[in-house]
Image (tube, rainbow, N blue to C red):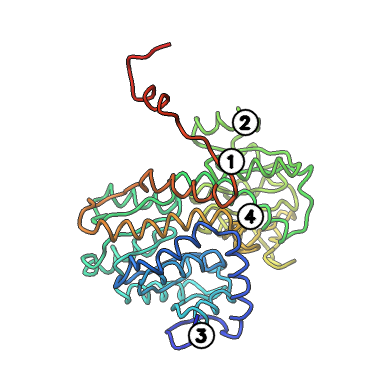
């Protein structure tokens, strides 16, 4: 692709582009489904003339979604969904090598993030690809006059879907929103296998500690919590799960985990991982009960799952002891170690989900954008699921790329499944 640096951008250093391009290409080796979509989009241009804003983690995997969107003919702008997840070399390569406007750099402060949100909305998007629904929420709160420009939005995360459901309940979601998060080929794989592996990867990179024999407390037993708990057990850790949902708690028990309230788990844990999408899951009263040197991190969404303000109020000194690792010296004499400033540890201290699982997540995102355009004016306001046939096609393409075949129903079996007259 022709190299250009003429597009508007705000990235850390364009000289990092060569390294970024190498890593983008490496990730692409594990993303055959999205590659096939990229090739089709380049021929068909299904998003031609569409102004698109993507608020995502700027990683090697996201780069392939951005390339697919550009191949489709969209006029796209990318901003970061998390200040600590941006890979600066990837951002540089997207600008310099692919001509995609990116406004993101690692470590941007809250004011910069808000400014980038405004830059994104200045693009007057027809489609928003969101991760946490910040762009959509800002549009509704501050730019009502732009809503008529919007064909729809797609949402990547559980947290974002919860916010969209709240918007729908309040009557302010007046446009279609595609629930990418709940596609089977997204949450079964991305949330369970991606979050599970990458969370432990982030903890190990940040601390270099042995997980075997440790007591790990996982707050939340949704798909992300399931994957995290299972992978922690696979590394030899003892795992406690905390939950508020009795059904999920029962499931955790039946999966062989101890289930305790956080107040009971707090004195027992060596490592605490929040994966709830809620706020203040670990609070001041829990820090007081923890062992000296307990490690706390978040792999849910925003940095509010751990109440760092409360922790700071109990602290005499905060010291960075390793990259992405801060030790809070408590007035009681104990210490609590916080990873990645309470932000997503798998992105702050590691590289996020493996590209093989993001292949399916971002295939869903790309096809959701295409679906919105194809059905412009036909979809009612509110949340819409990814069509089952799209989900199944992504799974089929993934299996095909892995060299795995599945059976098909025979004519007799099809007749049987469609009949009510045949019994035992």
* Marks 1 and 3, the one that precedes in the sequence: 3
Q: Do callouts 2 and 1 mark residues in contact (Cβ within 8 Å)?
A: yes
Crowding around mark 1 (Cα neighbors within 10 Å: few <14, some 14 to 19, many 20+) is many
Quickly name the residue at label 2. 255
Residue 152 at what x, y percent from top left?
Answer: 29, 60
Q: CA distance from mark 1 to mark 4?
A: 13 Å
Q: CA distance from mark 2 to mark 1?
A: 9 Å
Which disc number belongs to residue 3?
3
Residues 84 and 411: in front is: 411
Which disc number belongs to residue 226?
1
Residue 288 at what x, y percent from top left?
Answer: 66, 48
Residue 213 at what x, y percent from top left?
Answer: 79, 42
Q: Secondary structure at mark 2?
A: loop
> Which quadrant of the figure has residue 412?
top left
Foreground mark, 2 or 3, reads 3
Q: Is residue 80 above or below residue 96?
A: above
Quickly name the residue at label 4. 198
> Which quadrant of the figure has residue 372?
bottom left
């Amino acid at each position: 692709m022709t190299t250009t640096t003429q597009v508007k951008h705000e990235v850390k250093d364009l000289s990092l582009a060569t390294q970024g391009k190498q890593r983008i290409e490496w990730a692409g080796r594990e993303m055959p489904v999205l590659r096939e979509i990229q090739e089709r989009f380049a021929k068909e241009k299904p998003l031609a003339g569409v102004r698109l804003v993507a608020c995502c983690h700027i990683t090697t995997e996201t780069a392939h979604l951005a390339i697919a969107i550009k191949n489709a003919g969209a006029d796209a702008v990318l901003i970061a969904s998390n200040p600590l997840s941006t890979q600066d070399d990837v951002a540089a390569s997207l600008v310099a090598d692919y001509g995609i406007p990116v406004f993101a750099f690692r470590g941007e402060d809250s004011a910069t993030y808000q400014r980038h949100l405004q830059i994104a909305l200045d693009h007057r998007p027809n489609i928003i690809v969101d991760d946490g629904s910040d762009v959509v929420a800002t549009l509704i709160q501050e730019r009502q006059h732009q809503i008529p420009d919007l064909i729809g939005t797609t949402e990547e995360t559980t947290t974002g879907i919860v916010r969209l459901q709240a918007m729908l309940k309040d009557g302010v979601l007046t446009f279609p929103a595609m629930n990418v998060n709940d596609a089977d080929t997204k949450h079964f794989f991305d949330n369970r296998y991606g979050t599970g592996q990458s969370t432990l990867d982030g903890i190990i990179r940040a601390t270099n500690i042995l997980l075997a024999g440790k007591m790990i407390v996982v707050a939340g037993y949704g798909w992300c919590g399931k994957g995290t708990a299972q992978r922690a057990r696979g590394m030899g850790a003892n795992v406690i799960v905390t939950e508020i949902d009795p059904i999920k708690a029962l499931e955790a028990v039946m999966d062989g985990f101890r289930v305790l309230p956080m107040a009971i788990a707090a004195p027992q844990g060596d490592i605490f991982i929040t994966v709830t999408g809620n706020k203040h899951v670990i609070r001041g009263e829990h820090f007081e009960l923890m062992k000296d040197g307990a490690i706390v991190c978040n792999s849910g969404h925003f940095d509010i799952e751990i109440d760092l303000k409360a922790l700071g109020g109990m602290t005499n000194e905060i010291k960075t002891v390793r990259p992405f690792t801060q030790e809070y010296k408590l007035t009681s004499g104990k210490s609590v170690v916080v990873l990645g400033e309470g932000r997503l540890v798998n992105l702050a201290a590691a590289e996020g989900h493996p590209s093989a699982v993001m292949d399916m997540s971002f295939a869903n995102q790309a096809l959701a954008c295409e679906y919105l355009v194809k059905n412009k004016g036909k979809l009612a306001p509110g949340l819409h699921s990814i069509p089952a046939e799209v989900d199944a096609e992504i799974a089929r393409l993934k299996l095909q790329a892995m060299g795995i075949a599945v059976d098909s129903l025979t004519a007799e079996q099809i007749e049987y499944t469609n009949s009510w007259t045949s019994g035992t």
